Amino acid sequence: MIIFVGRSNVGKSTLIFRLTGKLVRRGKRPGVTRKPVEVNWRNRKVIDMPGFGFMSGVPKAKMERIKDDIVRFVEENAADIELAVLVIDGKAAPEIIERWEKRGEIPIDVEFYAFLRELGIPTVVAVNKIDKVRNVGERLNFLAGKFEVPYQEISEVFVPISAKFGKNLDVLRLMIEKNLGKRRVSEDLQDNVGDGLADTIQ
Ligand code: GDP
């Protein structure tokens, strides 16, 4: 299972469509439906989680509920989630992050990244709408600082993309494949270790 998470309006459904060819659009008011949307892709489930964070016209209590539901879903399915793709708006994210920090709060994207990592879920951060950003390298460095990703690991975690204009999606695809492979390899290793133990005990 692969999950896509992110604020509403970051381009999550555009990206999923670009990658999988599947439509996950849920009606006219994005983000209002709270249920995860599931599509099948290459024998895997791809889940589009409801957008979290601020949405104009949605009451704060409802936004909190959406966030809680996402957290619960991820916790309950952690063992089956092979990869999370956290989609952020590369243009808007820095300003939003700094606004939250000024209020003394942990920015929700940063919080989600830490949460996914804590659960041991491999996570790729798709920095979308990069067509609107001038200095991409600088932006990635800034985000890495906020997400506490070491400098040497930036290219393993962050991928600047434009879902709308199809930019760098091949790089994202490769990162997805690499991460899926990693998990499988480590599971195989665990199986082997298990077999070895069983042999020893017998
Ligand atoms: P979601 O709410 O995260 O699923 O976001 P959508 O996929 O519905 O996209 C929200 C808006 O952002 C739409 O108007 C998209 O056309 C636009 N959008 C998505 N990806 C990009 C991108 O890479 N660049 C730009 N400039 N706009 C984008």
Image (cartoon, rainbow, N blue to C red):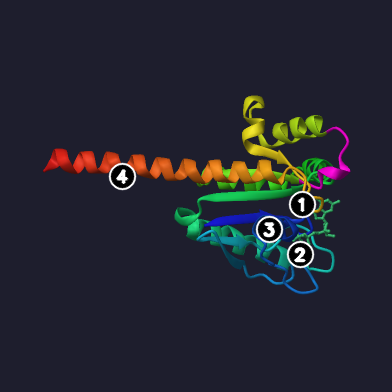
The three-letter code of the residue at mark 2 reads Lys
Q: Which residue is mark 4?
A: 191
Q: Callout 1: helix, strand or loop?
A: loop
Taking 164 as reference, is 113 left or right? left
Q: Are marks 4 and 3 in contact (CB under 8 Å)?
A: no
Taking 88 as reference, is 46 left or right? left
As drawn, the label of residue 60 is: 2
Q: Callout 2: helix, strand or loop?
A: helix
Q: Residue at x 77, y 49 (%)?
A: 166
- In front: 111, or 179? 179
Give the magenta-colored segment's residue range. 128-135
Taking 30 as reference, is 174 left or right? left
Q: Which residue is mark 3?
A: 16
The picture places residue 6, in percent across and down from the top left corner, at: 70, 54
Q: Residue at x 67, y 70 (%)?
A: 34
At label 2, counting other C-alpha atoms closer than 10 Å, the crowd grade (few under 14, some 14-19, many 20 or more) is: few
The picture places residue 88, in percent across and down from the top left corner, at: 74, 48
Q: CB of residue at label 3: within 8 Å of ligand 1? A: yes
Of the numbered discs 4 and 3, the one sitting upstream in the chain is 3
At label 1, counting other C-alpha atoms closer than 10 Å, the crowd grade (few under 14, some 14-19, many 20 or more) is: many
As drawn, the label of residue 163 is: 1
Distance from the alpha carbon under mark 4 to that under mark 3: 32 Å
Q: Residue at x 80, y 62 (%)?
A: 55
**Count of all numbered marks drawn on residues in the image:** 4
As drawn, the label of residue 94 is: none
Q: Residue at x 57, y 47 (%)?
A: 116
